[in-house]
Amino acid sequence: MLVLTRKSEESVIVGSTIEIKILGIKGDQVSLGFQAPKNISIYRKEIFKAIQDENREASRGQNDIESIFSILGRPFFQGANLNKEV
């Protein structure tokens, strides 16, 4: 981990396209400003983790069709086009 000391209004450049600027310091809180290309997503860590957890949970649901097959039996779906858009 790189550790830097910055004062208010000073910046750090990440790569060549992302600038992180110290906007202010009040007590134990630091206000940061981020300037980055629109295709770069910036999240607070707790939000990023929640998104990852939600995506992981959603990907587990992809096996639901196998559960349906095991309950109803594959013959029930014979001839059905399961990839057809409705």
Image: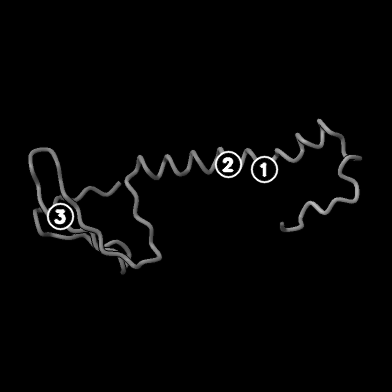
Question: Which of the pair 24/69 is nearer the observer?
Answer: 69
Question: Residue 46 vs residue 67: left or right?
Answer: left
| Residue tagged 2 | 58
Residue at 74 percent across and 41 percent down: it is: 65
Helix, strand or loop at mark 3: strand
Decide which of tag 3 and tag 2 comes sooner along the chain: 3
User: Could you say where residue 12 lies in the image, as x and y percent from the top left?
Assistant: 21, 60
The mark lying in front, picked from 3 and 2, is: 2
User: Could you say where residue 11 lies in the image, as x and y percent from the top left?
Assistant: 17, 60
Q: What amino acid does circle 1 point to? A: Gln
C-alpha distance separating marks 1 and 2: 7 Å
| Residue 6 drawn above or below residue 48 | below
Taking the view exactly as shown, the residue that stands out farthest to the top is 71
Question: Which of the pair 7/38 is nearer the observer?
Answer: 38
Residue at 8 percent across and 43 percent down: it is: 26
Callouts 1 and 2 close, C-beta under 8 Å: yes
Q: What amino acid does circle 3 point to? A: Ile
| Residue tagged 3 | 22
Q: What amino acid does circle 2 point to? A: Ala
Question: Residue 16 vs residue 57: left or right?
Answer: left
The mark lying in front, picked from 3 and 1, is: 1
Residue at 42 percent across and 41 percent down: it is: 49
Question: Label for residue 62?
Answer: 1
